[in-house]
Every structure is written in structure tokens, then in C-alpha cells.
Amino acid sequence: MLQAIALTCTFGQHTALHALDLEVGKGEICCLLGPNGAGKTTTLNCFLGFLQPAGGTALVNGINVAQHRQEARRHLAYIPETVMLYPYLSGLENLQFFNALTGRELSKEQYIQLLLDAGLQQAAIHRRVQTYSKGMRQKVGIAIATAKNAGALLLDEPTSGLDPRASNEFSDLLRRFSNEGRAVLMATHDLYRAREVATRIGIMKEGRLLTMMDAAAVDHYALESIYMEHMTAEL
């Protein structure tokens, strides 16, 4: 579903992404770990078509993003670190509004079920979003992404600021997306969460993908050790 081939992105004289090669297939959850400036968000933005690569190719379901951005985006759903919603609308109204922009039509009952499936409590569905916690807003964002029925999900630090219960609920949702055959690419600082949900884990630094490993082949301690080795080593 997602493929980067020698993908390179520059900002002036600075190279933010160095010839990245990456594949994420259907049903896979790939987590990219790394500090700020590692190139994780730049990678997501290239797949979304927000950035024009200086070299290489980003493909979504075989579609060249740089050449056919709108067509590629039809296969994508994106959940940022902070989900921006209309505060004076309810969770339900926000979901209805954003889904209408995609041209898809759903019944009110379907919208409510999407919010419930995302973990939002029944009592909160009709409340204004300005009363929501960050975790509740994230759940509306998840419902918006799910309603699109996209084949691939791009997530940028989606659990940042969430309490442990909300983070665990989010992990359960990612596993459900994987079981449904969706491809998930998540940028995160959270080694524990990455090990908990990922099928593969990549470590990035200074725009380079240093290693890609099978998550089942390492425990939390081994992952932390490998991560720290890469962070302290000279490139």
C-alpha cells in the first residue's frame, strides 16, 4: 500500500530525508522511531503530498503521489498529533462535516457506531468538542479516518499526551485496523507503544532509515538497547 523508493526531501541546503526505501503492506503496522528531526514526519508528508520530493518516488497503492496527489489521497487517512476539530460542534457533527467533504454518505446511526467503535462514550457523542479531553478528540479523529474507509493510515505521534488507558484503547484500534487489512505507518517517540503494536519497527536519525526490524524478534529491553546504540553512534 505504501512504498518509498530512494525518496529524498530537501529544505534549502538541508537534506531532511536521504534516499529512503520503505514498504508497508496491507495488514502491516510499521512504526518509525527517532528523535525530532529524524525525518519521520517528513516521510508522512511526502506520502500525503504536502512536500514535493527532491528525488525518488512515494507510491500509495501504486499511485505516484507527486504526479497524482488527489488520487493517491483517496487511499489515505491521516491522524496528526493534535486533531483539529470545530469546538462548538459536537463529536457527531464534526464527524458528519468532515465525512461530507469526502463525498461519502452515511446514516446517523452509522456515524454514531463509528464513534462508539473508536472508543468515544455514548454520553459524549452529542456534547460540544470544547468539553473533550485530548483522548476524546483523538477518538473523533479516528472515527473520521475510519469513515473514509482508506486502505492506509498515516499517524503522527497519535498517542502523545494520552493517558495510559486511552493509549491502550488506541493500540487496540490499530490492531483492529491491521486485522481489517489496512496498512498503518506511524511516527512516534514511544518505544514501548511501538513494540506493543507494530509488526515492523524502523529507527531513523538525521533523515536516514538506519534499520528495520521485525517487532516480534525483539523485546522492550532489546529495542531500547538497539535504539540507544543508533542514537549515540556517528553517522
Image (tube, rainbow, N blue to C red):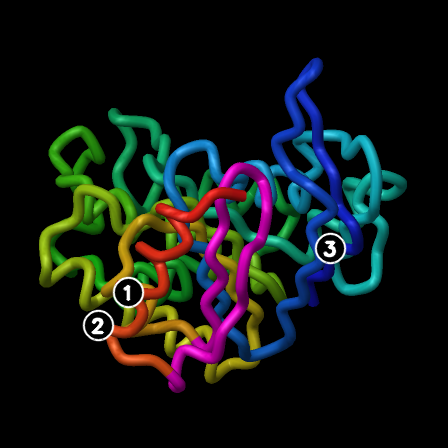
Q: What label does residue 221 carry, if any?
A: 2
Depth check, mark 1 against mark 3: the one in front is 1
Pointers 1 and 2 in contact (CB under 8 A)? yes
- State whether the magenta stretch is mostly helix, strand or loop: strand
Q: Quadrant of the N terminus?
A: bottom right
- The secondary element bearing badge 3 is classed as strand
User: Disc 1 to disc 2, how far (Cα)?
Assistant: 6 Å
Pointers 1 and 3 in contact (CB under 8 A)? no
Q: Quadrant of the C terminus?
A: top right
* Position of residue 65 measured from the top left corner of the image (x, y, whole percent): 79, 45
Residue 182 magenta-highlighted: no
Q: What label does residue 202 carry, if any?
A: none
- Residue at (59, 46) in percent of width and height: 208
Q: Give the residue at mark 3.
A: 4
Residue 206 magenta-highlighted: yes
Viewer-closest of 6 and 146: 6
Give the extent of the magenta segment: 199-217
Q: In the drawing, does residue 196 fall left or right of residue 214? A: left
Total tally of numbered discs in the picture: 3
Question: Against 35, is 224 above or below?
Answer: below
| Type of amino acid at the residue the image marks with label 2 | Tyr
* Position of residue 49 measured from the top left corner of the image (x, y, whole percent): 71, 37
Question: Against 144, is 51 above or below?
Answer: above
